[in-house]
Amino acid sequence: MRRDEIEDELSAHIQLRADDLERSGVPRAEAERRARVEFGGYQRVREECREASGGTFFESVGQDVRYALRLVRRSPAFTLVAVLTLALAIGANAVVFSVLNGLVLRPLNVVDAGRLYEVKRTDTKYPFQSYPDYLDLRDRNRSFDGLAAFNMVQAWVDAGDVPNRVWAYQVSGNYFDLLGVKPQAGRLIHASDEQGPNSAPFAVLSHAYWQSHFHGDSAAIGRTILLNKHPFTIIGVAPQDFHGTVVFFNPDFYVPIVNREQTNGVNDLNDRGKRWVFMTIGHLKDHVTEQQAVADLNLIGADIEKAYPVEAGKTSFALAKPSLIGDVLGPGVRAFVTALMVLAGLILLAACTNLGGLFAARAADRSREVALRLALGAARLRILRQLFTEAVLISLAGGAIGLAGSIVVLKALAQWQPFPRFPLTVPVLPDASVYVIALLLAVVSGLLFGAVPMRQVMRTSPYEIVKAGAFNKAKRLLNVRDCLLVVQIAICAVLVTASMVALRGLVRTVNGHYGFDTSNAVLANTDLEMAGYHGDAVRAMQTRMLDAVAAIPGVTAVALADWVPLGNGGGTGSPVFTDDTAELIPARAAARSMTFSVTPDYFRAAGTALLSGRPFASTDDEQATKVAVINEELARKVFGSTVEAIGRHYKLRDGTRVEVVGVVEDGKYGTVTEDQQGATFLPLRQAPWSSTWMIARTSGDVGQLATAINTRVRELDRGLPIYMQTWEQSMSFPLFPSRVATASLGVLGMMGAMLSVTGIFGMAAYSVSRRLRELGIRMALGARRNEILQAALGRAVKLLAIGSITGLALGILASRVLSFVVYQATPRDPVVLAAVVVAMSLLGLVATWIPARRALSIDPLILLREE
């Protein structure tokens, strides 16, 4: 009805003016024509009136959508390229954001997670506390509603069928109550269960373990099982959505921490010098700030340090969110995931610049259409709105496809088990925040590349366009499309540089020498206390195992070690003091050393070179003088040189004097990216351990050796838990960050290269297409082939050079973060620099090949005849 009223009003206005002209003597037909001319654009006035009345917004938006759909259907090639480009970019961002969200941003799935904090020491990057320190913090602090502790441990479970190895949380009695966790079945562990060491032989099953091993049977509650041959009663099942308080580690069991001797084989609940409590967590009180809590904890720490200067050492604390993976696996992991998010954002920016250039070219090709719409009275803002509508529709389609693809990838990642030995998961399934981010990225991307032609439309002169057939172009050093292409090429160069740095670092990592030889060697992990061995029985069984394996044909060396370098934990760091140091506190230490307990033939079995002195002998037992073999780094720090170390003594933290009998080559012990550090090797007889790694080196096939070792060990004790792998297979754990970094950066680099190729190709092809007549005239006047190529593609090549140099410089700066996760990753490697230059040159060659062929195949006679 309102539309009819507007039509009647406008028609009446024109007719009244025509009547006036007719009364002045103008013929009726001419009067109506002149009235319409004076009135102006009828359609424009009608739309303005309807918009002023407030009734056309949704209708006009619908018109824009329908028109945009017709346009994209008429250009299927452009639409397909644009949608797939955005699908790749938005999908990559959704995947990376889900990883960042799952491992870093998302809080733990517990009650009041916003107030949950981890208490960590400031003198180490690891979160470990001693149990007595935890008790002091729990009982004396005034800032937390409570403090709970937990640790992760392996155990051997016998539930009456086939014994198997499980991973368990050792938890304080208040752990579940503090987190507000309710049982799925039965009950959970409470503080009242703790009545002293080994006083609470209770076990709580994880929901997954309950389903997989007890088939969800409620009769499992109350059943007695054997943990390391100690009876434990199953008292409950944790809820299905609770997986502990480390976001990537899902345990099978929860047992009381006071039963550590039964589940770990050691009784160190009262040892303040041993830091084994993995994490201490608690809820801040409502009125307490983080700064106040830290001050409160440090007052307690000062008292502990004063009372126990030797055992406790420097004792100060800080707070962190327990869900942050970087606080567990090191700062490099969080930095790398964040950097990966930035690089994925650059991919999206490159996609937007690519599409922005295509949209600008598309707007130029549609210049006559835009000019005619302006001449007919269409508002410039309406034309811009229609362009934005088209861009947003394309971006939403690309976002939907990209999100669907990312969900498939994320589901695969969530089920991925990179290390079957550990209950590791990647909690990356998308939640509402991922969907919101994907939608925002789609909308913002559409607005970004849709805004590129805005300048052209706003400055369009309909008269000039209709006369000349194209947008007027001011002669500028760089136009908008040129700038976008430079940005896109620079982003591509950043990604290519980062991927080359990661690849070069991975090659060095795989081929590097870490102070041991992984070839032709098998590792077998056993824990004798899990099988019920204690005291002298442990040493006797270890000797029998060595003798049995040494008798296998083809075995050239066999030894035991409490840990192997880079072996999923790789020893413990402890202070080392010079022999004349009187005050044995950490501040007086000459160095910190990774410490390993090994049997006499270890260095030959490990392939570690002995530089001077002697290896251990069978006589280096508990009755003999304390001796050690140290590496070069420790010898330099403590004694000044490797030569002077032999026969000298140093002191341990407890005052024990140790004689150095040998010096071995340096190596890597904790991570492949660590700085060089000291290492101490002690005789296993003088520093006994029940959990050991057997290293067996063979001159034959390692697969056959593994089978033979398993058979010989089972002959000694069928119930002995054993885990076996080749040493080369075990390196998948320390090399995992490098491989993931290389793979992820390689994928992003390839995506950046694809976008860069399409961007350069689009710019070069458009340039050749728009200048065909000029190039034909040049050829008709006798221009040589190289001059034609320079005229047609010179600008594209210059932009490629500018963008590549800029991106290479930025890539060198951005690649520094890779040094945290990739061994010897340096962007200043000449091989990397040369590879980036070659890669960008090849990209430019590929992108300009077809436009160059087209430019050189121009027939000036045919072209000029068509003109």
Image (tube, rainbow, N blue to C red):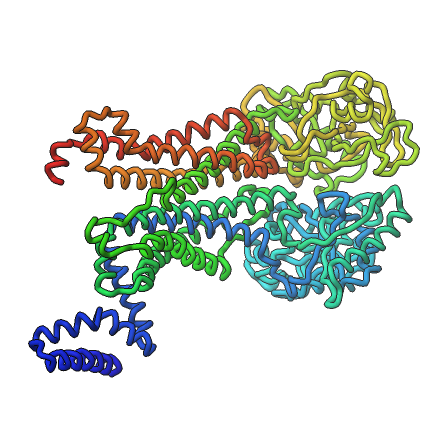
169 vs 146: above or below: above
Q: Residue at horizontal 88%, vertical 36%?
A: 584
- Residue 778's spot in the image, x, y percent? 21, 30
In the visual, does 319 lie left or right of 1?
right
58 vs 273: above or below: below
Numbered circles on residues, count: 0
Foreground residue, 645 or 746? 746
- Residue 544's spot in the image, x, y percent? 72, 29
404 vs 1: above or below: above
Foreground residue, 100 or 493? 493
In the visual, does 521 lie left or right of 685?
left
- Residue 229's spot in the image, x, y percent? 71, 47
Foreground residue, 664 or 315? 315
Q: Is residue 575 visible?
A: yes
Image quarter hosting the C terminus: top left
- Residue 725's spot in the image, x, y percent? 58, 33
Q: Residue at horizontal 56%, vertical 37%?
A: 813
Foreground residue, 602 or 111? 111
525 vs 38: above or below: above
List the single residue furthest toward the front: 24
Q: Residue at horizontal 19%, vertical 25%?
A: 782
Image quarter hosting the N terminus: bottom left
Q: Quadrant of residue 734?
A: top right
List the single residue furthest toward the right: 582
Q: Is residue 550 visible?
A: no
Q: Quadrant of residue 179?
A: bottom right
In the visual, does 634 lie left or right of 156?
right
Q: Quadrant of residue 622?
A: top right
